[in-house]
Each structure stands twice: as C-alpha cells, then as structure tokens.
Image (cartoon, rainbow, N blue to C red):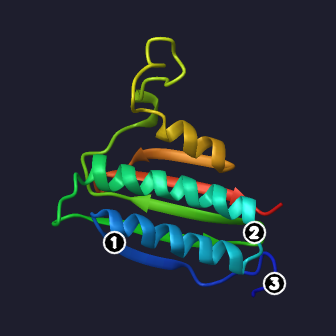
Amino acid sequence: MQKSGEDLQPIHLSLTSDLQSVDQAEESVMSRAESVGFDEDARLDLGLAVREAMVNAVVHGNKYSTEKKVKLVIQNSVDNLRVTIVDEGVGFEMKAVPDPLDTQNLMKTSGRGLLMMQTYVDELSVRKAAGGGTEVIMVKYLA
C-alpha cells in the first residue's frame, strides 16, 4: 500500500463500448483508491459514481458502437483522486439536462445518474469534450 496521498503515475485506459468495460473501469478506480488510502466507504462511493459515468458513456454516448472507445484516466495527488471519462458520442452539456427532482420528472425511469454521481463525489464536471463526445471529471478528496 502506498502512503496516503502519495503521487502515483496516472493510469490511462482506452476501453471498448461494452458493459465489461464498466466493470474494468470500476475495478481500476477502486484499486487505485485503495492504494492511496481511501477507506471502504469512499471507495464504494467512487465505484458507484464511476459505474454510472461509464454506463452513460457506453450506452448514451457511444451507443455500444464497436468503433468507439471510452477513455479513462485515473490520477491522484496529495489530497484527492481524479477520474476522467471521455466518450466519443455527440456530447452534451450538463446544464441542458432536466432537473430529476423537478415534479414533472419525478416519475421518469431515467435521468438520475448525474445527480447520483454528484452525491458520491466531491466535485463533478460534465461538458462537451474538445474532440467531440462528453468529458466527465470526478474528484474525491481524502478524508
């Protein structure tokens, strides 16, 4: 195990647009989180946020296209773990997503993933990626 907060080399993965990649991404993030000192609760929070972001990238972004990849970057610094997920879809802006807590949206069966991600990480940024697609950046701070 690394010392808490020790800098490690970033992990860069290019993942296929299938649900096996969701598991691979979650395992990679949770492994790095454990190695830098995150407790079990924080690791589980990260895992849930990463799963949701990856499912969005594979299903909504890349639409399961075998031609498209999902980029995953895992970085840590002295006090946090940063996870970046980029798909190759058409992209969207977070401000364009309807509020899932609005009374008109409460009964919808989808649309809560971004809210869930916000709940489980300390910082969330979602924007159109420079080369197309959507870039999701999640940051979780060490306690």
| Helix, strand or loop at mark 3 | loop
Q: Position of 118 compared to 108: left or right?
A: right
Q: Residues within 10 Å of mark 1 (few under 14, many from 20)?
A: some
State the residue lying farthest toward the bottom: 1
Q: Which residue is mark 2?
A: 38
Residue 121: in sight, yes or no? yes
Among numbered discs 1 and 3, the one appearing first in the sequence:
3
Residue 33 % position (x, y)? 67, 72
Among numbered discs 1 and 2, the one appearing first in the sequence:
1
Q: Position of 38 compared to 25: left or right?
A: right
**Alpha carbons under labels 1 and 3: distance apart:** 29 Å
Look at the image and tell me in which quarter the C terminus lies: bottom right
Residue 62 % position (x, y)? 25, 54
Look at the image and tell me in which quarter the N terminus lies: bottom right
Residue 21 vertical placement versus 129 (above, below): below
Q: Which residue is mark 3?
A: 3
Residue 7 % position (x, y)? 70, 80
| Helix, strand or loop at mark 1 | strand
**Which amino acid type corresponds to the residue marked 2 in the rendered image?**
Phe
Q: Which residue is mark 1?
A: 15
